[in-house]
Image: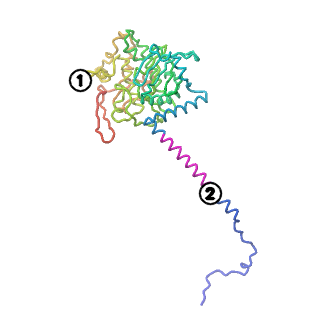
Amino acid sequence: MLHRDASPMSFSDFLSTEPSPPPPSRSVLIGVSSSISLLIIIGSLICFILWRRRKQAEIHEEAMEHGSEEGNLFDVDQAMEDDFEKGSGPKRFRYKDLVVATGNFCDENKLGQGGFGSVYRGFLNELNLQVAIKRVSKGSKQGRKEYASEVRVISRLRHKNLVQLIGWCHEGGNLLLVYELMPNGSLDGHLYGANNVVLPWSVRHEILLGLGSALLYLHQDWDQCVLHRDIKPSNIMLDASFKAKLGDFGLAKLVQHGRRSLTTDFAGTMGYMDPECMTTGKTNPESDVYSFGVVLLETACGRRPVVVAQREEDAVHLAQWVWDLYGKGRILDAVDERLGGEFDAQEMERVMIVGLWCSQLDFKMRPSIRQAVNVLRSEAPLPSLPALMPVAYYMPPAGTQSFTSSSVT
């Protein structure tokens, strides 16, 4: 017995005159297939290009961190040549022109000598300009590394309180940097120089404000955050009007705004280095703020950051000494005696308290450079600091012991 559950079909269903759609032609199928293949190839090519660029960037960054000398110098050449084509940036000099400018680098024109090279006074006839020419020692690997770093960083910076890079030379193994000449030397030379001329407080105060302005530009007002990492009086140059200009960017690092720290190599000058950086290997904008605080105290007191003694426990740490006087309500007793009492008491107190604020051992307790500058400019009230200098606790890299400090080491 048959059961018919399906709906009955009419005879007309079999006689439908509506034609069925034709199957896609072979040419259409081939066209669609080719388009898809082309898109896949293009997509793969784009992915490969992006991957390669990212890989090259990683290799370049690693080379920068580990000091690949040839790579750094090649990058400098390429970057600077691009600036020349645009008609901007420092000028490239021929080595023979710098030989003429310095009298063949004669001793009479030598302004100073450091571990990585010498600085000479020179005169550029074509520009009718007095300059200072830094010549890197050929045998100094660190000097050559710093040359590449300095050109790359300072050539892009423009600020009234930064030493201007006029040009550079990389020719025949010779590396030279050409700067505007600073007729009055460095702040260090005036604080501790052999001459008996005392730098007046009004001039010192303006120098410190200028230094603060330079750091504000480097940390917050430029495209990237520039960590100088070697702020000290010998790198604070003075022009003909004793206006401060921060120089020597050989140790500088560029980081993105908002990045709190950078693990880096041990660099800087003892007495001005952030103790936390020395312990953990990490540097941040507050590391420069620490150095700035030390310079504030040093300029106000006319004393080195650390007075070395035969025994370590007898060494006098400037920040600790000033803080002790601050806690006793006698902070002005720390003022440089050579000033003979000729200074503005409110300005002096403001500078010294900001110096203590900036040079605290725990970086989280330090101000930003903008906060510090605002107080120095009397645009914000003085901070309230504890009577005793706070103790800092550092967490060094894994595998080492923790470190606690209550004084600069």
Callout 2 amino acid:
Ser
User: Looking at the image, which residue is at 62% across and 57% down?
Assistant: 37
Residue 357 appears in the rendering: no
Kindly report the secondary structure that dominates the magenta region of the rendered protein: helix
Q: Say which of 159 and 229 sits in front.
A: 229
Instruction: Write down the quadrant of residue 379 in the picture.
Output: top left
Helix or strand or loop: what does disc 1 sit on? loop
Question: Which residue extends farthest front?
Answer: 172
Image position of 8 (left or right of 370): right
- Dot label at residue 37: 2
Callout 1 amino acid:
Arg
Say which residue label 1 marks. Answer: 311
Helix or strand or loop: what does disc 2 sit on? helix
| Residue bounds of the magenta highlight | 39-59
Q: Are marks 2 and 1 in contact (CB under 8 Å)?
A: no
Instruction: Write down the quadrant of residue 90 in the picture.
Output: top right
Residue 112 appears in the rendering: yes
Residue 54 located within the stretch drawn in magenta: yes
